[in-house]
Image: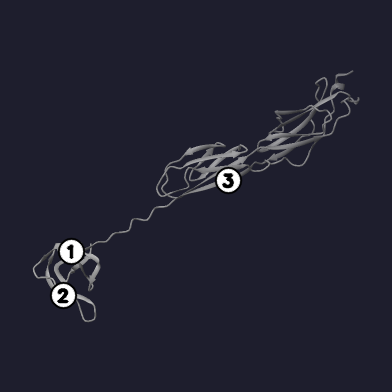
Amino acid sequence: MHKASYVLLALPLLLLGSIAQAQTAGTITFTSNRISSTASFAPVLTWSTSPVATSCTAGGGWSGTKFASGSETLASISASTSYTLTCTWGNGSATVAWTVPTANSDGSTLTNLASYKILFGNSSTSLTKTQTVSDPKATSATVPALAAGTWYFAVRSVNSNGVESVNSNLAQKTVSGASAAKSLSISITTPPPPPTTTTLKAVARPTYDVLLNSSGTLVLGRQVGNVLLGTACNSSYKVGTSYYEVPSNAVTIWNKPRSTHLVAKCAVS
């Protein structure tokens, strides 16, 4: 028997459907140690992907390429900031199908078909990866875990002596990765300043007693003494437009008051 009789016929290759994209974009879990603050602080961002992403990239308040999972302490922030993590799942798969050979290259009946070899790669002239299909009755197989890019495929049949056929026709498809993004915002709110306290203080020395006129209105009486300038005034007791009660112990009295309340001219200080 000639050596050629051990060489199987080339196999026509068919591609079933399209190269599968990554089945779906995966899930990103993305958290911060704090999402709100009333003062500056250093955020600690923690993330993970399921299934494990091929690559991740940071955006917004941080940047750079990130691992598929991790934790990172960032520089302190004093204003509200948003952070984004975008991840890609680049693997896909291809299903190839072929016709089962029935004859050797010399035309004799093929009786010892043993398996198939799928050859594939990112170049039509360099199919550097292989996958074996051990069932001689198989007519298709799926090539998994294909990274994003253009892939080329061919099939060989193998007999029980280990002799391989030449490559089948070449097939080509492109795998594109699926991606997803997750964002979080950290809010920093500045508390309002404490209310300004205003104090009434005596701005003139003359101090008066207080009288009640015929209409029931409080009016200045006579000067009874002098108050120390800067003495705190009682804002709840007012006479006229600018006279407020002052403590009697801050007044030098030289004319006996006719009321229990003494007032002097006061202003906000």
Q: Residue at x 81, y 26 (%)?
A: 115
The answer to whether residue 191 is left or right of residue 253 is: right
Mark in the foreground, 2 or 3:
2
CA–CA distance in space, label 2 to label 3: 79 Å
CA–CA distance in space, label 1 to label 3: 69 Å
**Which of 250 and 49 lies nearest the eye of the viewer?**
250
Which residue was labeled with disc 1? 247
Q: Residue at x 70, y 40 (%)?
A: 174
Residue 144, quarter of the rendered image: top right
C-beta proximity under 8 Å, tags 1 and 3: no
**Which of 116 and 215 lies nearest the eye of the viewer?**
215
| Residue 269 against residue 115 in the figure, above or below | below
* Numbered label tally: 3
Q: Earlier in the sequence, mark 2 or mark 3?
A: 3
Outermost residue to the top: 1
CA–CA distance in space, label 2 to label 1: 17 Å
The answer to whether one can see residue 228 in this image is no
Which residue was labeled with disc 2? 221
Image quarter of the C terminus: bottom left
Residue 1 drawn at (x, y percent): 90, 18
Q: Earlier in the sequence, mark 1 or mark 3?
A: 3
The answer to whether one can see residue 218 in this image is yes
Question: Looking at the picture, which amino acid does disc 2 mark?
Answer: Gly
